[in-house]
Image: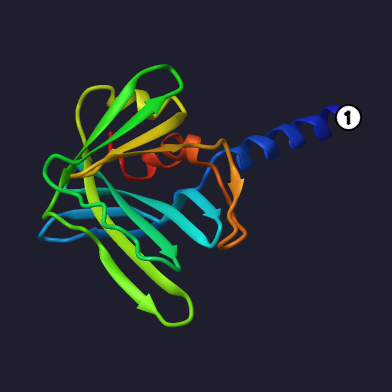
Amino acid sequence: MKKIVFALILLVSFSAFAQQPCELDANVNDTIGTYKATKQHMIFERNFAGNSNNVFFTLTNTNGILGLDIQMIQSSADFIKANCLDSNSRIYLQLNNGKIVTLLFVGNETCGTLLHNERKGNSRITTGTFVFSKENFDDIKKSPVTFMRIKFSGETIDYPFKSGFVSELDKKMYKPETFFMDYMKCVDSN
């Protein structure tokens, strides 16, 4: 009997820890409208030969419109060329089930901000907001993302997703493939 009780407690404990908690960075509901945003999560990290490239995602819900805020931070001792976002920019997410989810850029054209530090070199920070289109929206809540393609104004860059990695930046564990499965429920009211 003790073994059965112990097994049940263990099973309940594992299932409780398996689900990601909803950690919101913002949750506003006032006369202007509603706004929810998840905490920022690292999706991609590459460090090679003194150059680094980090991509962060934040899911948002602004008056019922689901969006994705993206922040890309590049660092290098050399000059960093600009990858601009404009009205034709898109994010394509390849799902494990073979489907592709397209996100559309909203906002003004941006080429990011170039920062220079005498000791550490150059950094370029580019931010943008994308919204989900209606097609295949439900699929992203059920299937892992294996690949991301960002169409900038001048070129297209591919980002393979990992099932998980420990960031060199903050030593935290991130799971890019299941990001939408884990956190879409935090901002989606459906």
In this rendered view, identify the residue nearer to me: 178 or 38.
Answer: 178
Residue 155 found in image quarter:
top left
Q: Mark 1: which amino acid?
A: Lys
Q: Name the residue under label 1.
A: 3
**Picture coordinates of residue 59, whole percent (x, y):** 33, 47
Relative horizontal placement of residue 138, taking residue 10 as reference (left or right):
left
Q: Vertical placement of 52 versus 155: above or below?
A: below
Q: Vertical placement of 88 versus 126: above or below?
A: above
**Picture coordinates of residue 144, whole percent (x, y):** 47, 28
Residue at the spot x=45%, y=55% of the render? Answer: 53
Residue at the spot x=17%, y=57% of the render? Answer: 110
In this rendered view, identify the residue nearer to me: 19 or 67.
Answer: 67
Q: Which quadrant is the C terminus positioned in?
A: top left
Looking at this view, name the residue that lies furthest to the bottom.
Answer: 118
Residue at the spot x=28%, y=53% of the render? Answer: 36
Crowd band around label 1 with a 10 angstrom C-alpha radius: few (<14), some (14–19), many (20+): few
Residue 170 found in image quarter:
bottom right
Looking at this view, name the residue that lies furthest to the top.
Answer: 98
**Picture coordinates of residue 49, whole percent (x, y):** 56, 58
In this rendered view, identify the residue nearer to me: 187 or 158.
Answer: 158
Q: Which quadrant is the N terminus positioned in?
A: top right
Residue at the spot x=32%, y=51% of the render? Answer: 70
Looking at this view, name the residue that lies furthest to the front.
Answer: 78
* Mark 1 element type: helix
Indicate the colouring scheme. Answer: rainbow
Q: How many labels does the image show?
A: 1
Relative horizontal placement of residue 169, taking residue 104 as reference (left or right):
right
